[in-house]
Image: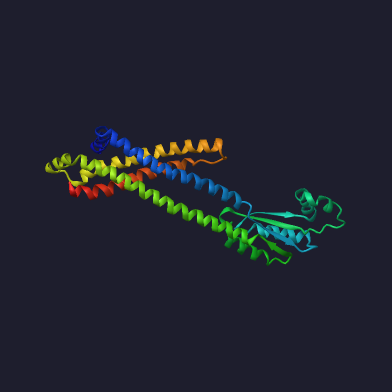
Amino acid sequence: MNLVVRESLLAFKRAPLLSALSVTTIAFSLFVLGLFGLVAVNLQNALRSVAERVEIVVYLLPGTPIEATAIGLKDIEAFPEVQMATYVSEDQALARARAELVEFRDVLRELERNPLPASIEVKLKPTFRDADHVTAVAERLRSFGFVDDVRFGRDWVEKLDRLRQLAAAVGIVVGAAFAAVAIIIIGTTIRMAVLQRSREIAIMRLVGATDGFIRRPFLLQGAIKGLLGGAVAVGLSYAAYALIDRYLIQAAFFTREQAAAIVGFGALIGLLGSAMSVGRHLKRV
């Protein structure tokens, strides 16, 4: 194992320019992927923020006893999809309307009778804020005897679902494309290293070295290059994030887990690129 590590590190010393070029190329490939990842992270945060506003409003029949409302509130809070259910009385609804509808404040102040019904505002748990779950919960709420109407903005929730699905699909396609490009680039640089050491490999074969023994340093070399490229890409992504956050718009950066995943992804595609290239080109040496 020590021999494999030493051989892998010696490859960087033998061809520093080629190694630096490989790491730089990988880093910029992953940097582009990282920039797209930053867009995806901030888009997901924005969608999550919008999804937090998804709620179902249950309007109660006039004259519903407070005891029936309290029992119904507990039943609704027991739903597995429900995060929180809040009772809003007629007076609270009117006070809220006066505060929010400034242009109608005078009209609302002169009302002799409160026309607004009491309601229960139902907020769902994050994993249940899609159109199917919201619709299912709304249908269940309509079965309560004290319910007059249920509103949740079906069209708006469905559009939010489509936007989330589109963002996920684009993320998968673009991420796969950049990963494929990075693997091809790494494979090309490893192939150059194999061809550069073709005479040395031929001598190793003459003294009985197996293909597995010859292959291992190249695989580790590719993983190290991918690891270094991933680390540089994260650094460049952070620099881009800092500039955007300071001069353009407030943005979010990767979590530690996401940043570590990018570095690990770099090592993985470095390993894959090396495996593909070495397996193909050792046969030709």
Q: Is residue 26 above or below residue 57?
A: above
Q: Position of residue 50 (x, y in %)?
A: 60, 51
Residue 23 % position (x, y): 34, 38
Q: Front-most of 271 and 136?
A: 271
Q: Quadrant of the N terminus?
A: top left
- Seen from this angle, which residue lies furthest front? 248
- Name the residue at 28% across, 49% down: 276
Where in the figure is residue 57, as x and y percent of width and height?
69, 58
Can residue 283 be seen here? The reply is yes
Give x and y (percent) for residue 125. 59, 54
Q: Considering depth in this image, is 35 or 100 the residue closer to the camera?
A: 35
Q: Which colour scheme is used?
A: rainbow
Tell me which corner region of the image, top left, top right, bottom left or bottom right, holds residue 233. top left
In the rendered structure, the answer to whether residue 45 lies left or right of residue 210 reads right
Q: Does residue 128 appear in the picture of this structure?
A: no
Residue drawn at the location 36% of the way across and 48% of the way down: 181
Along the viewing direction, whichever of 219 and 185 lies nearer the viewer: 185
Horizontal side of 284 relative to 162 (left or right) equals: left
Residue at the image point whose x is 49% and y is 44% from the top:
38
Q: In this view, does 61 lie to the left or right of 206?
A: right
Looking at the rendered structure, the number of numbered marks drawn on it comes to 0
The quarter of the displayed image where residue 135 is located: bottom right
